């Protein structure tokens, strides 16, 4: 390839110059000898210049070949960097998509907790109604006691009075049992309300952590995308941002096992506290319907 730009040496001027004088005795050529020597000198000078130009051409051809090799290597490096940047961007997009999906799941769980809170409000209303009924029953029991006292004073039928007293005592005992049951139910509901409130606070904190991690992941994705077209000012700021990411106390979004373990633990806590409460609330509803 380098030989295409090379010039081949031609000795034609020398042969022509040697072929010019055929007869030295010809009077027409006697006056041309000095001019012939000048031509030979000029031809030799041009020959040296041609040799110098050929050497320069050879050096330029070698330099051109080396530059073409460097350009080819640079293009290969550029294609490799472009592929690497695309892979990094795809990985970051997948991580952001996973974090967003988890945040949606936690939002759904939070909405379910809101529904449980509404159910708890209904249970409180029922407890209040039962408390009012208990007060009414207490008032009725007082009236019945008054009537029993009057009946003792008015009648001498001891057997009948004793049977009525026994019946009243049984009613009172059942009323007391119902009141104690309602007290226990109310205490249990209050405890479950506290537990649900704690679980809700934990879930809100987890959602805030996920939103923070989503923002950090977006920043890292923008940084990775900008790595394909770096600038001097961005390089200095990028190093400082990485220091800020290193100090985060949240789980590393680049480690899927750590993130899954972290949020699986939070979901495990939610299940341990919410499922027993829902079961007990359903049982209380059934028992209340049976009593009614």
Image: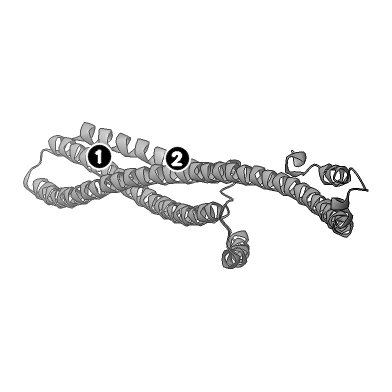
* Residue 204 % position (x, y): 41, 54
Measured from the top left, where is residue 196 in percent x and y? Answer: 39, 49
Relative placement, left or right, of 227 versus 111 is right
Outermost right residue: 25
Residue at the (61%, 63%) spot, across then down: 235
Residue that carries the numbered disc 2 in the rendered image? 271
**Foreground: 54 or 122?**
54
Report the Cα–Cα distance between label 1 and label 2. Answer: 36 Å
Q: Is 246 displayed left or right of 278 in the figure?
A: right
Judge by depth and name the residue closer to the eye, 222 or 176: 222
Element at label 1 = helix
Q: Which residue extends farthest front?
A: 27
Residue 186 in the figure: left or right of residue 68: left
Q: Is residue 167 above or below residue 30?
A: above
Residue 29 visible here: yes
Closer to the N terminus: mark 1 or mark 2? 1
Q: Nearer the viewer, residue 157 or 56?
A: 56
Quadrant, the C terminus: top left
Residue 256: x and y in percent read: 57, 42
- Check disc 1: other Cα within 10 Å, few if <14, some if 14-19, many if 20+: few
The residue positioned 31% from the left and 49% from the top of the image is 186
| Image location of residue 205, percent across then percent down | 45, 56
Q: Residues within 10 Å of mark 2 (few under 14, many from 20)?
A: few
Please say if the residues under marks 1 and 2 sit with CB atoms less than 8 Å apart.
Answer: no
Disc nearest the viewer among 1 and 2: 2
Is residue 273 in sight in this rendering? Answer: no
Residue at left offset 32%, top offset 46%: 111
In the drawing, does residue 39 fall left or right of residue 142? Answer: right
Residue at numbered disc 1: 174
- From this view, report whether residue 82 is shown above or below residue 48: above
SS for dot 2: helix
């Amino acid at each position: 390839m380098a030989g295409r730009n090379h010039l081949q040496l031609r000795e034609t001027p020398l042969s022509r110059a040697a072929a010019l004088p055929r007869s030295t005795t010809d009077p027409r050529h006697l006056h041309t000898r000095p001019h012939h020597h000048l031509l030979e000198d000029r031809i030799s000078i041009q020959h040296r210049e041609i040799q110098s130009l050929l050497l320069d051409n050879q050096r330029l051809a070698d330099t051109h070949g080396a530059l073409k090799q460097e350009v080819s290597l640079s293009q290969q490096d550029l294609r490799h960097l472009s592929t690497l940047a695309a892979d990094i961007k795809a990985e970051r997009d997948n991580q952001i998509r996973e974090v967003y999906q988890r945040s949606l799941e936690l939002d759904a769980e939070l909405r379910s907790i809101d529904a449980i809170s509404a159910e708890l409000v209904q249970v409180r209303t029922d407890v209040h109604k039962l408390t009012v009924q208990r007060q009414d029953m207490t008032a009725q029991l007082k009236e019945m006691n008054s009537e029993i006292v009057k009946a003792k004073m008015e009648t001498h039928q001891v057997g009948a009075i004793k049977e009525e007293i026994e019946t009243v005592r049984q009613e009172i005992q059942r009323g007391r049992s119902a009141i104690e049951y309602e007290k226990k139910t109310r205490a249990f509901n209050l405890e479950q309300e506290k537990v649900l409130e704690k679980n809700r606070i934990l879930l809100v904190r987890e959602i805030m952590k996920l939103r923070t991690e989503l923002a950090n992941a977006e920043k890292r994705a923008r940084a990775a995308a900008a790595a394909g077209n770096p600038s001097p000012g961005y390089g200095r700021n990028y190093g400082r941002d990485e220091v800020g990411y290193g100090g985060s106390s949240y789980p590393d979004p680049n480690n899927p096992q750590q993130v899954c373990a972290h949020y699986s633990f939070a979901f495990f806590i939610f299940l341990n506290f919410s499922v027993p409460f829902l079961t007990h609330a359903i049982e209380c509803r059934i028992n209340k319907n049976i009593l009614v």
